[in-house]
């Protein structure tokens, strides 16, 4: 049977289906569903979500927020975090270009939030103190102009696809085309993103995936497992915790974030596996991505009080989230000729079986054997703006 496709939004064709539910599976087939709904009330007012349920894993995509991934569930285990911001937040309420450069934080509560496409790091200001690049860029607060969902009954694949444009007249025209795909009954979500330069001029693009977890995946005693070649603290605050970078404490009121930059090893196929597991090995998350596409990895630790956002971020990217000009000087961006594209591929595996967690950890252990990680006790030139 051919793939069935439903166009839910197409701004050029004037199409917008506020409510949608995929047809019931054929009798005897495994259960699945794709639903679209519009949220009401508070800063969620008018936000549409697309919920995909493959029978084992459920996840919610937010087209209005750059096709971000709000939350996911594997059985009764929720993947995401509890931000002080109770979203998903409509972009109308996010002052991305606030003069202090930090307005992006007023919409931040997703499981997966893209940062980019022009810049993805810390705010940057010109010599007069005016904002040049806001924190983490604009893409997460731009709406998709086209959204479609698809079901392929022959393969069991369910997909959500979207197009988001980030453009400024006389400056840049970048397009993000994204696909979330999963198969009925599996515990994986595959993401494929293509960024295209629509301009007649060359362009430089940056993209970082801010993938965030709170309880139950994050708890006192949780651990990050990765094939580390080198690790550098971003600043003196991060250097204070370098000896225990892979371990997580209980929530602590007043905790100040710590950020680490990594060089990670890839397997024979060029994939980098990273595992986050809770203290008892009952819930975890395995991330896989292509090192040639996303050569930089950042770890964000923000183990503050739960009321303030007890969270950690796993962040593969084209670059480290330093100011845009610094990363540009180091050549850490995707360079795009007119009409050229670059593709990024990630796999998110939601783990609730201790055996599956052990399998992922063993995979990383095998890849790490023989590595002698360089662990720097202070920020390093070339890695961070010291």
Image: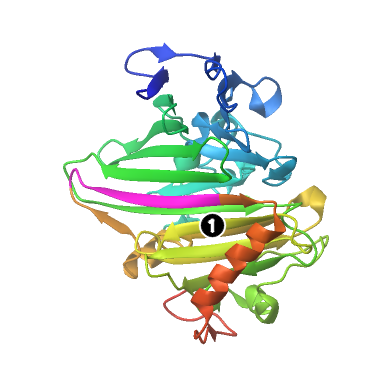
Q: Is residue 339 magenta?
A: yes
Depicted 204 relative to depicted 166: above or below:
below
Nearer to me, 257 or 355: 355
Q: Disc 1 designates what residue?
A: 287
Q: Which quadrant of the figure has residue 73?
A: top right
Q: Which quadrant of the figure has residue 246?
A: bottom right
The residue sitting at 55% across, 64% down in the picture is 274
The residue sitting at 67% across, 60% down in the picture is 355
Q: Is residue 349 visible?
A: yes
Nearer to me, 141 or 193: 193
Q: Which quadrant of the figure has residue 145?
A: top left
The residue sitting at 54% across, 32% down in the picture is 62
Q: Is residue 249 magenta?
A: no
Picture coordinates of residue 242 (x, y %)? 65, 79
Question: Left of 267 or right of it: where is 219?
Answer: right
Residue count near mark 1 (Cα–Cα under 10 Å), binned few <14, some 14–19, many ≥20: many
State the SS at label 1.
strand
Q: Is residue 386 visible?
A: no
Q: Which residues are magenta?
A: 338-348
Dominant secondary-structure state across the stretch colored magenta: strand
Picture coordinates of residue 40 (x, y %)? 67, 19
Depicted 41 relative to depicted 72: above or below:
above
Picture coordinates of residue 235 (x, y %)? 59, 74
Nearer to me, 382 or 222: 222
Picture coordinates of residue 18 (x, y %)? 53, 14
Question: Left of 276 or right of it: where is 333?
Answer: left
Depicted 251 relative to depicted 66: above or below:
below
Q: Split into 4 quadrants, where in the image is the N terminus?
A: top left
Nearer to me, 222 or 57: 57
The residue sitting at 64% across, 43% down in the picture is 109
């Amino acid at each position: 049977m051919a793939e069935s496709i439903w166009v839910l939004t197409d701004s050029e064709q004037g199409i917008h289906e506020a409510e949608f539910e995929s047809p019931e599976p054929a009798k005897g087939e495994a259960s699945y569903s794709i639903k679209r709904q519009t949220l009401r009330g508070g800063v969620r007012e008018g936000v549409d979500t697309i919920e995909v349920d493959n029978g084992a894993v459920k996840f919610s995509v937010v087209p209005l927020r750059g096709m971000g991934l709000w939350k996911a569930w594997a059985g009764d285990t929720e993947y995401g975090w509890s931000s002080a911001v109770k979203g998903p937040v409509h972009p109308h309420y996010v002052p991305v270009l606030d003069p202090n450069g930090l307005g992006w934080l007023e919409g931040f509560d997703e499981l997966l939030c893209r940062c980019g496409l022009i810049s993805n790091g810390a705010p940057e200001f010109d010599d007069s103190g005016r904002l040049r690049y806001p924190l983490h860029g604009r893409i997460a607060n731009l709406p998709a102009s086209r959204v479609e969902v698809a079901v392929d009954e022959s393969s069991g694949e369910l997909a959500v696809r979207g197009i988001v444009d980030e453009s400024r007249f006389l400056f840049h025209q970048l397009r993000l085309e994204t696909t979330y795909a999963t198969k009925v009954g599996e515990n994986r979500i595959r993401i494929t993103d293509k960024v295209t330069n629509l301009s007649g001029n060359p362009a430089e693009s940056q993209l970082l995936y801010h993938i965030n977890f709170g309880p139950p995946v994050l708890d006192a005693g949780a651990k990050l497992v990765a094939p580390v070649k080198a690790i550098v603290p971003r600043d003196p605050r991060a250097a204070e915790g370098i000896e225990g970078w892979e371990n997580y404490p209980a929530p602590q009121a007043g905790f100040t974030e710590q950020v680490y930059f990594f060089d990670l090893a890839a397997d024979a196929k060029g994939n980098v596996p990273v595992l986050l597991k809770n203290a008892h090995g009952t819930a975890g998350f395995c991330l896989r991505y292509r090192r040639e596409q996303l050569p930089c990895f950042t770890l964000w630790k923000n183990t503050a009080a739960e009321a303030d956002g007890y969270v950690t971020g796993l962040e593969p990217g084209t670059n480290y989230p330093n100011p845009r000009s610094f990363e540009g000087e180091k050549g850490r961006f995707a360079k795009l000729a007119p009409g050229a594209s670059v593709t990024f591929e990630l796999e998110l595996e939601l783990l609730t079986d201790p055996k599956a967690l052990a399998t992922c950890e063993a995979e990383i252990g095998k890849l790490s054997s023989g590595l002698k990680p360089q662990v720097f006790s202070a920020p390093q030139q070339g890695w961070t703006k010291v």
